[in-house]
Amino acid sequence: MADPEWRQGRYLVEGANPRRGLAVARMGAHITYLSDAALHRKFGRKFQDRTNPTFSFDADFEVESYLRHQGITFVERFDANSYLYLTRAMDYFDLAADYDGVLANAFKGTPTRFCVISFTSDWLFPTTDSRAIVHALNAGLARVSFAEIVTDKGHDAFLLEEPELSAIVRGFLDSAGAARGLAPKG
């Protein structure tokens, strides 16, 4: 919204595009998708296409180049107002509010089986939040299983090759299929 091209959200009708603002927003958000350990493992303090610092405002470090790339490619496939509305919807979402402030009430009587999985290095959805959901599911007498995967891959661990995640999801789905009389695949 600080990008002058945002134009109070009327950028399309005014023939503008807040590309720089959206790119910066994506760069800032992208840092939270990786853990500190994952960032250090992937980038460390390595320079981008040079052996010595330039002491300029160019992208000296690989991590800077990576984040800039993430910002630039994001604006090609995402709309600034859509990004604002989605992030705002996430900020306002409060399932418990619809149930007198008691999250467990949201799950009472549900026939759904739940599998809650968390990653120890996820800053966006920390294990403490996942455990609170599991406690609410238990209090609402819902069927729930919980797994915490120890990894330093951060929030993006669910997108990466994580054998433990695959095994947990496969086991959960096979179990759900067996409960319905379906044979596991593969």
Image (tube, grey):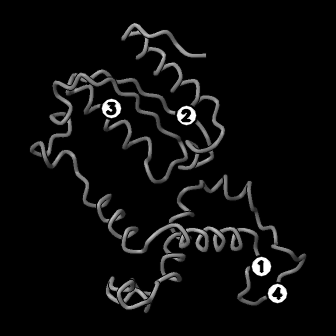
Write down the quadrant of residue 162 in the picture: top right
**Residue 156 location, x and y as percent?**
57, 49
**Residue 120 location, x and y as percent?**
53, 41
Compared to 77, does 158 lie above or below?
Answer: above
Q: Do the residues labelled 1 and 3 touch (CB within 8 Å)?
A: no
Disc number placed over residue 54 in the picture, else none: 4
Q: Image quadrant for the C terminus?
A: top right
Q: Earlier in the sequence, mark 4 or mark 2?
A: 4
How far is mark 3 from mark 2, CA to CA? Answer: 15 Å
In the displayed image of the protein, which residue is found farthest to the left? 100
Q: Which of marks 3 and 2 is nearer the N terminus?
A: 3
Q: Do the residues labelled 1 and 4 touch (CB within 8 Å)?
A: yes
- In front of the other: 26 or 149: 26
How far is mark 3 from mark 4, CA to CA? Answer: 50 Å
**Residue 128 location, x and y as percent?**
39, 42
Q: Which of marks 1 and 4 is nearer the N terminus?
A: 4
Disc number placed over residue 149 in the picture, else none: 2
Residue at (21% x, 27% y) in the render: 139
Write down the quadrant of residue 69 in the picture: bottom right
